[in-house]
Amino acid sequence: MYLIDRIAHTNRWTRRPTPEKLFLCLGGLVLCMAGPAPVTGLLTFAATAACALFAARVPPRAYAAVLGLPIGFLLAGLPVLMISVDLSGGPLLSWRADQIPLAAALIGRAAGAVSCLTLLILTTPVHAMIPGLRRLGLPAFLVEIMLLTYRMIFVVAETAASGYAAQAARLGYSGWRRSLRSLGMLAAALFQRSMTRARHMETGLAARGFDGNLAVLPEDAPPVSALRCAAIALLLGGLFACALWLESLIHV
C-alpha cells in the first residue's frame, strides 16, 4: 500500500486532470468488456502498460510488483478452466482442450481490465480521485467510507509494523512454535487496537460536528484539455478497430 501511494504522488501524471485519467482507464475497461476477446484485452494491456511505463514514468519494478499479484491469481485459476471432473464412475480428471478459447478469452479480458485499474491507482492519488467520484454521482456515504478505510489501512499497517518490531526484538520469532504464538498474539492485539482507533476516530468526528460529509480541500488542478480527451478517444477507437481487424484475420 505504501508503494502504491508513493508512486501515485511521484509519477509524471500526478498533476494531470483526474477526469482525463478516468476517461482513459474506464474507457479501456469498457473496451475490454465489449470488444472481441482475447485480442482487445491484450491490446488494452499493452497500451496501458506503455502509458504507465513510458508516459507516466512508473518504475518498471514497482509496476510489475503491483500488477504481478492479480495476474498471478489469474494464471493460478487457469488450470481450473482446463480440467474436467467426472464423478459418474469415480473421481476422474481429464484435460479439456476445447476450453482453450474460453480460458484465453477470460485471461485476455481480465488482464486488460486489471491493467486499466492499475494505471488509474498508480497515477491518481486518492485525494484527487474523491472530487471526481462525487461529480460522477457516487453516493456521499460511499465516498466517506472510502476515505476512512484509506486512512485506517495506514493506521493498521503502522500498528502491525511496530508490534512486529517489538516482538522480534524480544526473540519472538526465533522458532516456528514461538513464531506461531507471537503471530497469534499480534493478530489479537492488532484487532483490539484497530477497533480502539476506529472508536476514537468516530468520537473525534462526532465531537467536531460530523454530519456525514467529510470536507476535502480541492487542489488547483489544471483544466481538462479537449485535445488530450480527443487523443484518448482516438486511442480507444484505434484499439477497438485494431482488435476487430486482428480478430478477422484469426478467423479467416
Image (cartoon, grey):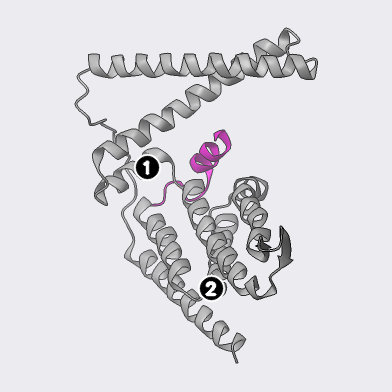
Q: Residue at x 71, y 13 (%)?
A: 168
- Give the residue at mark 1: 128
The crowd level at tag 1 (other Cα within 10 Å; few <14, some 14-19, many 20+) is: some
The crowd level at tag 2 (other Cα within 10 Å; few <14, some 14-19, many 20+) is: many
Numbered tag placed on residue 37 in the rendering: 2
Q: Let me know if residue 2 is in the magenta part.
A: yes
**Residue 53 x %, y %:** 60, 56
Question: Secondary structure under badge 1?
Answer: helix
Position of residue 225 relative to residue 154, above or below, is below
Q: Residue at x 73, y 66 (%)?
A: 94
- The foreground one among 65 and 251 is 251
Q: Which residues are magenta?
A: 1-16
Position of residue 141 relative to residue 112, above or below, is above
- Nearer the observer: mark 1 or 2; the answer is 2
Mark 1: amino acid:
Ala
Q: Is residue 80 left or right of residue 232?
A: right
Q: Quadrant of residue 250 in the image?
A: bottom right
**Residue 31 x %, y %:** 44, 69
Q: Residue at x 29, y 33 (%)?
A: 216
**Residue 218 seen in the figure:** no
**Residue 213 x %, y %:** 23, 31
Residues under labels 1 and 2: Cα distance? Answer: 33 Å
Question: Secondary structure under badge 2?
Answer: loop
Q: Pick the quarter of the image with the C terminus.
A: bottom right
Mark 2: amino acid:
Ala
Position of residue 56 relative to residue 7, above or below, is below
